[in-house]
């Protein structure tokens, strides 16, 4: 497979010179770990103290990594990206809520994004986080098979009902639905619930997608076990494959509580695990659909090569590539230019409510070796290319 990801002209065709400069400035800041720590602390303080910082945040980090403050706000970004063949996944990125009214509000927003996706070819997927529809501690308790109180049983029934309504709506509207993965200690309950939804709503094709974080040591085995269940019970598997976003938190908790970390011992081991999961799904594509969520060029080429070897069309609906908005445009836009299915996760929500997501993005970029430097090198190359014109 020829190298397509170094074409910065295609990667940044939608960015003005000003937007290119802003992106370069942002990643230069993110590349400085002490600055990220200080900026995170100051931002958290400013929001808690109700200081008027929304405008500053919106003009910098928010507009680079988010589509807008509400779903309608995102449409100009959605339409703009789609002119280059890049689709969008509207991601209501409000995190850390703990109250029933907030879960019902997230449910309503998720149903609204399904409706949006139904009406627009540029939005092929809807998405939600399990903790958007229920408390993390409740997932953990259910997953550990602990005895629930009567009120907790009622609460869990409401979580199940929310999941079911979203998945049922997605199936009725024929909109594929991505369900994100979160911390390992709550994931067992979420996995069981998503598997139930697959059994119920993936009878004809993959509508409901779970997410496998391949920095976890056990995820390939889980995929194989789910596949066996799917063969026995006659349903399709939809799976988003990612490396994972909670590594520091996972390792710190394992150390504090004295249990072996569930995380792979090295970046190389995670990469091998990721590629093994993709290969396994490609070998069973007749009953599976893949959303390859990756910012890794090698893994992207590996999947492209597998498709080529198996004579699978670049636009086969069972295979999607995905990246986050504001990152890895060299992968997204060059894939789209070569007619692969590609979608950007497009976060949205009120500025102060989306800040936990944005802070996690900054910290993740700082901790993933090579990610920020790659972004900077691409941006620098495009700036130099334009100056030379």
Image (cartoon, rainbow, N blue to C red):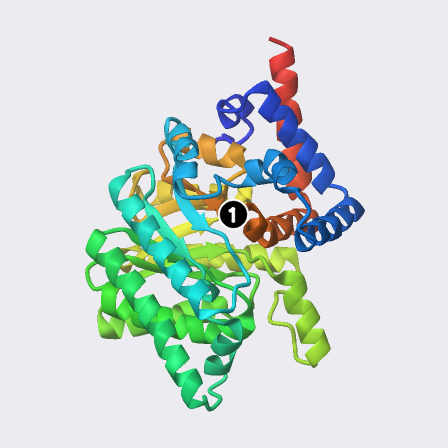
| Relative image position of residue 42 (x, y in whole percent) | 75, 49
Image-quadrant location for residue 200: bottom left
Q: Is residue 133 visible?
A: no
Classify mark 1: residues with Cα within 10 Å, few (<14), some (14-19) or many (20+): some
Eyeballing the image, is 90 above or below 264? above
* Left or right, 118 with reference to 299: left
Out of 247 and 42, give the one closest to the viewer.
42
* Left or right, 41 with reference to 79: right
The residue sitting at 60% across, 60% down in the picture is 269
Image-quadrant location for residue 6: top right
| Relative image position of residue 277 (x, y in whole percent) | 45, 59
Q: Is residue 28 visible?
A: yes
Q: What secondary structure is found at the residue carrying circle 1? A: loop
| Circle 1 residue | 350
Out of 314 and 157, give the one closest to the viewer.
157
Q: Residue furthest top?
A: 389
The residue sitting at 48% across, 39% down in the picture is 67
| Relative image position of residue 41 (x, y in whole percent) | 74, 53
Eyeballing the image, is 267 above or below 304? below
The residue sitting at 54% across, 70% down in the picture is 184
Classify the position of the C terminus by image quarter. top right
Eyeballing the image, is 109 above or below 159? above
* Left or right, 304 with reference to 140: left
| Relative image position of residue 18 (x, y in whole percent) | 61, 21
The residue sitting at 44% across, 83% down in the picture is 152
């Amino acid at each position: 497979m020829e190298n397509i990801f170094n074409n910065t002209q295609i990667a940044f065709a939608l960015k003005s010179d000003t937007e290119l400069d802003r992106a370069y400035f942002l990643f230069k800041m993110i590349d400085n770990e002490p600055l990220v720590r200080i900026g995170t602390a100051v931002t958290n303080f400013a929001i808690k103290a109700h200081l008027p910082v929304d405008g500053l945040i919106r003009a910098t980090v928010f507009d680079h990594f988010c589509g807008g403050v509400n779903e309608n706000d995102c449409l100009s970004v959605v339409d703009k990206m789609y002119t280059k063949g890049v689709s969008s996944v509207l991601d209501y990125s409000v995190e850390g809520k703990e109250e029933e009214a907030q879960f019902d509000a997230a449910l309503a927003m998720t149903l609204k994004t399904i409706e949006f996706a139904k009406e627009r070819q540029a939005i092929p997927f809807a998405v939600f986080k399990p903790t958007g529809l229920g408390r993390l501690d409740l997932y953990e308790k259910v997953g550990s098979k602990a005895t629930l109180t009567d009120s907790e049983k009622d609460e869990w029934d409401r979580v199940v009902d929310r999941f079911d309504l979203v998945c049922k709506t997605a199936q009725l509207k024929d909109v594929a639905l991505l369900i994100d993965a979160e911390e390992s200690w709550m994931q067992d309950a979420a996995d069981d619930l998503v598997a139930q939804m697959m059994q119920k709503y993936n009878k004809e094709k993959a509508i409901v997608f779970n997410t496998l974080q391949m920095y976890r040591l056990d995820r390939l085995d889980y995929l194989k076990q789910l596949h066996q269940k799917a063969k026995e019970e006659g349903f399709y598997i939809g799976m988003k494959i990612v490396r994972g976003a909670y590594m520091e938190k996972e390792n710190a908790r394992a150390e504090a509580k004295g249990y072996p970390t569930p995380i792979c011992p090295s970046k190389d081991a995670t990469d091998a695990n990721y590629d093994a999961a993709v290969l396994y799904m490609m070998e069973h594509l007749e009953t599976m659909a893949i959303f390859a969520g990756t910012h890794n060029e090698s893994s992207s080429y590996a999947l492209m090569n597998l498709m080529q070897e198996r004579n699978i069309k670049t636009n086969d609906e069972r295979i999607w590539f995905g990246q986050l908005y504001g990152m890895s445009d060299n992968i997204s836009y060059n894939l789209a230019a070569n007619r692969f299915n590609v979608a950007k996760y497009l976060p949205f929500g009120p500025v102060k409510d989306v800040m936990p997501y944005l802070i996690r993005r900054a910290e993740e970029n700082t901790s993933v070796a090579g990610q920020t430097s790659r972004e900077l090198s691409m941006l620098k190359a495009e700036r130099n290319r334009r100056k030379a014109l």
